[in-house]
Amino acid sequence: MRSSKQERITKETQIKCSLELDGDGKANVSTQIGFFDHMLNTLAKHAGFNLDFDCKGDLDIDTHHTVEDSGIVLGKAFYEALGDRYGISRYQSFTMPMDDALVLCSVDICNRCYYESNVSFNCDKCGDFEVHTTDEFFRSFAENAKINLHFVVFRGTNAHHVIEAMFKSLAKCLRDAITVREDIKGSLSTKGVL
């Protein structure tokens, strides 16, 4: 069972997370930010992860700490749950259409962190979610999961659609990249380890 439990308690957020990579997409998420809950539920569903995630943050200030710290915790859970990475497919790219939005996601589960995105928005919020924190979540997740993560937003004017396409495309990439293949012996690297 590839799974992890994580807890992070600071003066800004209190987070508990339980993640199973080889699940069936069941999620129980509460961050007190409705749109963000929707995105994390979407990620779990489309990646096939079982996710229990509870976050209480300083939303009287703004949503930044809650979203960024959620990326940290979920990234650490993913990193630990993946274990030795032996036999995984490692790479994946996927282009997600969602109405007006078209988003490419590419990942390399390589034990090195890098994040890049060209996303920009023409509004400040989706519901109570501050859209500028989108990059903060994905950057924090990539850094703590120790993966390369790239997004290219080809088009899209509706921020809800663009962000949801980002989460769904990441979910598809993660699901495929962590699949263990019988034809891969050990790690898919000339170094011998990932």
Image (cartoon, rainbow, N blue to C red):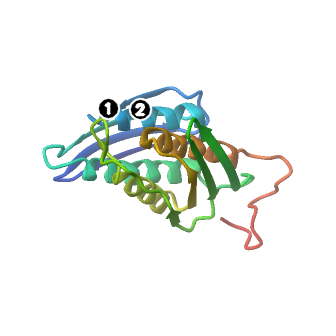
Residue positioned 74% across, 69% down in the render: 192
Could you say where residue 191 lies in the image, as x and y percent from the top left?
73, 73
Residue beneath label 1, please? 34
Could you say where residue 83 lies in the image, as x and y percent from the top left?
59, 52
* Nearest to the observer: residue 84 or residue 155: 155
Residue beneath label 2, please? 38
Could you say where residue 110 lies in the image, as x and y percent from the top left?
63, 64
Residue positioned 13% across, 44% down in the render: 60
State left or right for residue 17 relative to residue 146: left
Residue positioned 41% across, 58% down in the render: 140
> Could you tell me if residue 3 is visible in this image?
no
Residue 36, picture quadrant: top left
Distance from the alpha carbon under mark 2 to that under mark 1? 6 Å
Q: Are marks 2 and 1 in contact (CB under 8 Å)?
A: yes
* Nearest to the observer: residue 29 or residue 61: 61
Could you say where residue 130 lies in the image, as x and y percent from the top left?
30, 47
State left or right for residue 180 relative to residue 19: right
Q: In which quarter of the image is the C terminus?
A: bottom right
> Could you tell me if residue 94 is visible in this image?
yes
User: Which secondary structure lies at badge 2?
Assistant: helix
